[in-house]
Image: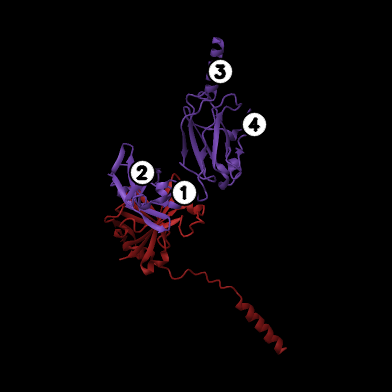
């Protein structure tokens, strides 16, 4: 009887060990708005042909030539670009962009910025009057390491055709 | 003899009118793959269909393109004498009509099997019709090697553009034997060349493949308010002639029309 009890306890403990870990917490809540505020310098630009990506273009004769994406950081003085995101209290406030001699890739130089979700943002809009530059945030989890990225999609009509990924480092 | 001549003239004229080609065809978007929806607009002014109140499409794809691109009738081609409603054009205004379709649905083929398509415009009963359209291409969904490749495939003057030169695919003797040195690029708007020609040094990315990259708006110093319509590019290089003297040669001039992006 004693052996049977030990066996049952053992089996119960063993099965409890197999219980899935249902801890779905998302970690400590970060103040993304505060993390995004400050002055950022553009460090690299990647250009993606979305048509080539959609159809998974590849060149078997030249497998080392990437037909889908390429780093274009060296084409223009992109590293001159400095983006400053200010706060309005604890919310997104104004922004300025100093392009230096780089092309005005975000079209605007000053205005206000807004997020789709101030707690867990996915999109960032730069706004000046009726002009809005729509951007998508990436590498958000690197904000604590003073890095993040903004993606900009270019469209032909309603069809997305080019994606630019801009990586930033906080000054 | 005179009667025969008159009869022949009348026959030729009537045939020509009955088969008159519609006017400009405009596509939105400008290019599309077989699985992408697109709309094209036509103007039937000057054709026997100009005064019709309902117009229908008769369409087919891949005519005489070989087994990799099988020919197919569109699903709208059910009965020449009684076209179905799904074949109806949408009236835009006046003699302008539009039709929206997706190649894969229309022809029952995969995007990779669709090379081009044609159509004609007709009345419901087929009593009147236009001539066949030219072949309109579907964008290749598989990479097609060529001597020159532009990256990205769509661009306007503000985009970074890379021109690739695959020398191993060149067929002209100058392109084949030169040592590529530069690309000469020129920007144009509707009034002609904008700014100066720009010479861009090539970068060899691997044996036989060369590349230059530039941003037209920067390279051509495009003034504010000016919109470029296209640019041209030419590869320049050198080789030694039969006397051992270096000479400079160029490949053909190629043109890229800018796309309308936002």
Asked if A80 appears above or below A51 in the picture, the reply is below
Closer to us: mark 2 or mark 4? Answer: 2
Distance, label 2 to label 1, CA atoms, is: 19 Å
Closer to us: mark 4 or mark 1? Answer: 1
Same chain for labels 2 and 1? Say yes or no.
yes
Q: Chain of mark 2?
A: B
Q: Chain of mark 4?
A: B
Considering depth in this image, is A119 or B133 the residue closer to the camera?
B133
Distance, label 2 to label 3, CA atoms, is: 46 Å
Considering depth in this image, is B107 or B28 the residue closer to the camera?
B107
| Residue bearing the label numbered 1 | B146
| Residue bearing the label numbered 3 | B11
Can residue B82 be seen in the rendering of this structure?
yes
Distance, label 3 to label 4, CA atoms, is: 27 Å
Q: Mark 3 and 4 residues: CB-CB less than 8 Å, in contact? A: no
Same chain for labels 2 and 3? Say yes or no.
yes
Crowding at mark 1 (Cα within 10 Å: few <14, some 14-19, many 20+): few
Pinpoint residue A120: horizontal percent, then vertical percent: 43, 62
Same chain for labels 2 and 4? Say yes or no.
yes
First in residue order: circle 3 vs circle 1: 3
| Residue bearing the label numbered 2 | B231
First in residue order: circle 3 vs circle 4: 3
Q: Colour of chain A?
A: red
Among the chains pictured, the one given purple colouring is B
Pinpoint residue A106: horizontal percent, then vertical percent: 34, 53
Q: Residue at x 59, y 28 (%)?
A: B124
Q: Chain of mark 3?
A: B
Crowding at mark 3 (Cα within 10 Å: few <14, some 14-19, many 20+): few
Considering depth in this image, is A81 or B59 the residue closer to the camera?
B59
Q: Which mark is residue B79?
A: 4
Closer to us: mark 3 or mark 1? Answer: 1
Q: Is residue A69 left or right of residue B15?
A: left
């Amino acid at each position: 009887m004693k052996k049977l009890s030990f066996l049952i306890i053992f089996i119960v403990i063993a099965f409890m060990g197999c219980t899935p870990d249902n801890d779905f917490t998302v970690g400590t809540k970060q103040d993304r708005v505060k993390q995004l505020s400050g002055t950022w310098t553009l460090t690299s630009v990647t250009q993606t042909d979305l048509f080539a990506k959609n159809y998974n273009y590849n060149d078997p004769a030249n497998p080392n030539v990437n037909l889908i994406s390429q780093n274009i950081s060296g084409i223009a003085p992109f590293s001159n670009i400095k983006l400053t995101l200010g706060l309005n209290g604890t919310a997104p406030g104004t922004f300025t962009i100093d392009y230096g001699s780089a092309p005005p890739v975000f079209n605007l130089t000053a205005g206000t910025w807004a997020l789709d979700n101030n707690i867990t943002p996915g999109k960032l809009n730069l706004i000046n009057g009726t002009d809005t530059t729509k951007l998508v945030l990436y590498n958000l989890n690197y904000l604590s390491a003073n890095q993040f990225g903004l993606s900009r999609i270019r469209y032909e009509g309603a069809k997305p055709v080019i994606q630019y990924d801009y990586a930033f480092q906080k000054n | 003899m005179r009667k025969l001549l008159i009869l022949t003239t009348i026959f030729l004229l009537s045939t020509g009118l009955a088969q008159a080609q519609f006017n400009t065809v405009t596509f939105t978007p400008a290019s599309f793959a077989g699985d992408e929806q697109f709309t094209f607009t036509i103007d039937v002014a000057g054709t026997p269909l100009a005064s019709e109140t309902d117009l229908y499409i008769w369409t087919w794809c891949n005519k005489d393109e070989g087994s990799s691109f099988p020919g197919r009738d569109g699903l709208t081609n059910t009965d020449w004498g009684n076209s179905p409603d799904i074949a109806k054009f949408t009236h835009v205004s006046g003699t302008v009509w539009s039709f929206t379709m997706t190649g894969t649905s229309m022809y029952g083929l995969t995007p990779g099997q669709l090379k081009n398509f044609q159509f004609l415009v007709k009345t419901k009963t087929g009593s009147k019709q236009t001539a066949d359209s030219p072949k309109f291409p579907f964008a290749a969904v598989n990479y097609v090697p060529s001597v020159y490749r532009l990256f990205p495939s769509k661009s306007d003057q503000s985009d970074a553009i890379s021109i690739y030169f695959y020398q191993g695919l060149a067929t002209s003797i100058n392109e084949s034997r030169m040592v590529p040195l530069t690309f000469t690029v020129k920007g144009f708007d509707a009034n002609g060349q904008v700014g100066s020609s720009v010479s861009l040094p090539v970068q060899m990315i691997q044996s036989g493949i060369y590349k230059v990259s530039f941003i037209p708006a920067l390279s051509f110093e495009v003034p504010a308010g000016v919109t470029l319509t296209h640019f041209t590019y030419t590869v320049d290089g050198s080789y030694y002639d039969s006397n051992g003297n270096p000479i400079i040669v160029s490949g053909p001039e190629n043109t890229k029309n800018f796309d309308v992006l936002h």
